[in-house]
Amino acid sequence: MILKLIKITQGTDGAIYSGKITVAQLLASYKIDVFSQSNQMGYQRELDEKRARKFATFLKEEISEGRKPAIPTSILLSYRKKITGTSTDYGIEAVFSDEDRLYIVDGQHRTNGFKFAIEQYGLNDLLKFELPIVIFENPVLVNEVKQFLLINNNMKKVRTDLARELMIKLKRSGGMDYPATEDDAIKATHITKLLNTSLNSPWLHKLSGPGDAKEGQYLNTQLSVANSIKATVLKDPATRRMTAETAGRELTKYWAAWEKLMPEAFNDDTYKNYLITKNNGFVTLHHVFSHIYSHLKHVKGINEPTVEDYQKIIKKAGDVSEADYWEREDGDAGNFGGGYGGFKNFADDVIEKLKDNGIEA
């Protein structure tokens, strides 16, 4: 396959090229690095067929009504080798062998929409349809993942937990740096993984992650808990400089203390009756954690608090430390409203109760 490309200079790692590709060429050469149990280094989610079929239906309707579809948005691709070919006045005639794969960073639903339209609606003329493309020359996988994170954190609303986990794996295996903008998100993901795998944690194997089946006795998702840690523990001056390992260890003890006070709220058969394992609970109580940890370390001088140390302090919050308070139907935990603003107000109320009982940070 030969593509006529223009080189774009933006000072990034690896060159950027723009050009066009026919649908036939794209379908013959694309690959999507989907996470699965057999591909633990993938960072994309499985195709949402509903979205792809919706796009295929759009193509079908446009053509049936005599219109030519207009698809001006570029498909963003990554080539995991150096792009080579013949230099020309406009750029390069890049040569790709039949074995070469163009990895889709952004545009998998449009690509599969074309595939559905051709295979299921018989719209074979679309094989000649030309699409604008941008190709990143990415011999190093970490750069491809950085671009995915950049696009989907700042330009689109797409879940990036798979990419965060892959960045952790790449860091461990190759000493690669995280993008600076992702430091807190990746650190929070690491902390959450520790909460989900620590033997003494009430969250042990109870947070669903990428690739996990939707059914099962999960208390919540890794993504939700990681986002709450990023917004609370990693923002508070008392705890933001903790290493991921220290934060994971202390949060495990902290949550074990809550479980000892109200085991029914974490039990597989009864947890749904309580709000403590929902956003109301863990976002609020991650705010409170920083206050309690600071008190134990800086006021009490305890460098390595025990579960019992946390438990004694939590009890000072009065009825908040009792299961009845967190009941979904009749408890008071739901009275502060939703959203991170409501949860912050809830946390401030708990912290005031602690201060009233002598627990200063």
Image: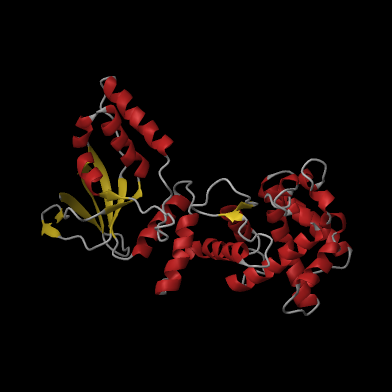
Residue drawn at 82 percent across, 45 percent down? 331
Residue 179 visible, this orientation: no
Give the left or right position of residue 138, taking residue 3 as reference. Answer: right
Residue closer to the observer: 48 or 9: 48
Left or right of 126 in this view: 246: right
Dividing the picture into quadrants, the one containing residue 163 is bottom left
Q: How is the image coloured?
A: secondary structure
Judging depth in this view, the residue of 129 and 74 nearest the camera is 129
Direction top: furthest residue? 65
**Number of numbered tags placed on the structure image:** 0
Viewer-proximal residue, 94 or 89? 94
Q: Quadrant of the C terminus?
A: bottom right
- Please provide percent x and percent y for residue 341: 69, 49
Residue shown at 73%/43% (left/top)? 337
Q: Eyeballing the image, is 344 above or below 238?
A: above
The image shows residue 144 at horizontal and vertical percentages of 35, 59
- 251 left or right, relative to 13: right
Whether residue 202 is visible: yes
Q: Residue at the location (49% across, 62% down)?
A: 182
Q: Is residue 83 above or below residue 333?
A: below
Q: Residue 215, percent across and down?
A: 57, 45
Q: Position of residue 123 (x, y in %)?
A: 24, 29
